[in-house]
Amino acid sequence: MNKKAIYFECYGGISGDMTVAALLDMGADEKKLKRQLATLPLKGFSIEISRVKKSGLDCCDFNVVLEEQYHNHDHDIVYLYGHRQSDPEHVHTHDHDHGHSHEHIHGHEHIHGHEQGHEKHSLHTDHEHRGLKDVTEIIERSELSEGAKKIAVDIFRVLAEAEAKAHGATIETVHFHEVGAIDSIVDIAAAAICLDDLGIREIIVPQLYEGRGTVRCAHGILPIPVPAVMHIAAGHGIAMHITNIEAELVTPTGAAIVAAVRTADSLPEKYTIRAVGMGAGKRDHKKGGILRTMIIEYMQEIQAESSMSSEDCIYKLESNIDDCTGEALGYVMERLFAKGARDVNYMPVFMKKNRPAYQINIICSQKDIPVMEKILFTETTTIGIRRMKVERSVLERKICKVETSLGEAQVKVCDLYGKLRIYPEYESVAAIAAERKLAYREVWEKILREAESILL
């Protein structure tokens, strides 16, 4: 069985705009990107997609252009690095195909924490006062695909959790600073649109390469890696490789994208490269400032006439808990799912001394074990967790988009020994049912019938 994955090679760092550029260069639909971005309820921005030279290589450049009144320090090189002695690595010039050089400055994203009770603001307010709820509303009110909306919200949640930890706040009270700026929202939305359009769910990121030194932001002069990047890497088990380059290579947005979408941290032993994307950063340095992405395809071995691969293993975590409230356990389940758990369930059990209790069972990938266990230890009263590696048999599947009489819908298509089975995706069915005020079952059955007539 052949399987596809997207591989992020982050030797030159990663940021939001670099990610978008690399995915576009690799084949994401530029027209679809522009069409969906135009539906964001934001004013004062446009986008530029061009070809540039980086270290003599042809790369794609994605740039969010802001109207004058929306400019901020995100693109001010003197502000970011002016506290250090002048360094030619901090400014560079792209060579564009249209015959003139166009100077860009490195974008910097952060979040600013505020106390509870801060006044509410509209969607078009100054970016310093946007919280996670405000940014989520911007995404939800747009016409991004359902898949892109989920990816974008997941990325912002990762950022909010990291900055809340850095500032001793909560994700409800932390307010975005530079990441709440229009250009940063557009970068994240654009990355989500491109990832969803490519339709490849396995994302491989072995490690992040970061520089050293200091950088200035709204909170003052901070060490590199900045706190948000450190908390994201720690919270999601992302390996960091610190280089000798005196510059920030990994922005919080870049780290959050990796944390939100990564499904594996190692490449298969053998694979075929199907497409390559080169995304230009906004500065030159010794590693070139390029994010390279690849679509790879590799073979999964078939065992016992099923689609179980020797590499297709998951982990089961379980713990017995007899002194937690139902509210606490419900909250824990929400957090586990938000952090990537494949499944979570509770079973009633009787423990020693006939105490009624619950056994919590979590299904997750190996990379997510540290995050899952941290949630269990910090949010429940457990003092021990059992961990088991489990092999599984899974059918080959893919997510397809189909045009139905009710609108575009997503369905899961599974290959059952040469015969296809189709399952409408819950989020897609629920969105159509709510929009058209129809019963969920009615929508599900209609999408299934029409998808079968198209795909079978």
Image (tube, rainbow, N blue to C red):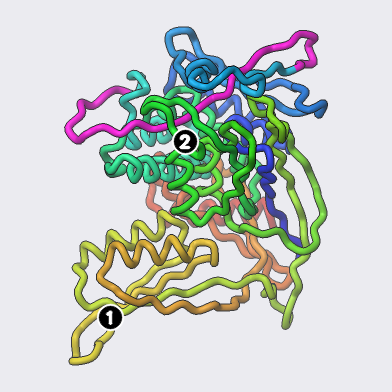
Between circles 1 and 2, the one closer to the viewer is: 2
- Does 33 sit above or below residue 150? above
Q: Quadrant of the N terminus?
A: bottom right
Numbered label tally: 2
- Residue that appears at 60% across and 45% down: 242
Answer left or right for 235 relative to 422: left
Pick the front one: 403 or 126: 126
- Find residue 403 and report its horizontal and vertical position in percent: 60, 42
Can I make out residue 405 in this image?
A: no
Indicate the secondary structure of the residue bearing disc 2.
strand
Q: Amino acid at mark 1?
A: Pro
Question: Residue most toward the bottom?
Answer: 353
Answer left or right for 383 relative to 199: left
Indicate the secondary structure of the residue bearing disc 1.
strand
Per the rendered image, the range of residues in magenta is 95-122
Q: Quadrant of the C terminus?
A: bottom right
Which mark is drawn over residue 223? 2
Could you say which quadrant of the image residue 160 lies in?
top left
- Residue that appears at 72% across and 32% down: 288
The residues tagged by marks 1 and 2 sit, at their Cα atoms, a distance apart of: 48 Å
Answer left or right for 372 relative to 354: right
In reply to whether residue 324 is colored magenta, the answer given is no
- Please tell me whether the stretch drawn in magenta is mainly helix, strand or loop: loop
- Residue that appears at 27% across and 76% down: 321
Q: Amino acid at mark 2?
A: Pro
Q: Answer whether labels 1 and 2 touch (C-beta < 8 Å).
A: no
Which mark is drawn over residue 348? 1
Pick the front one: 59 or 227: 227
Could you say which quadrant of the image residue 86 lies in?
top right
- Mark 1 packing: few (<14 Cα in 10 Å), some, or many (20+)? few
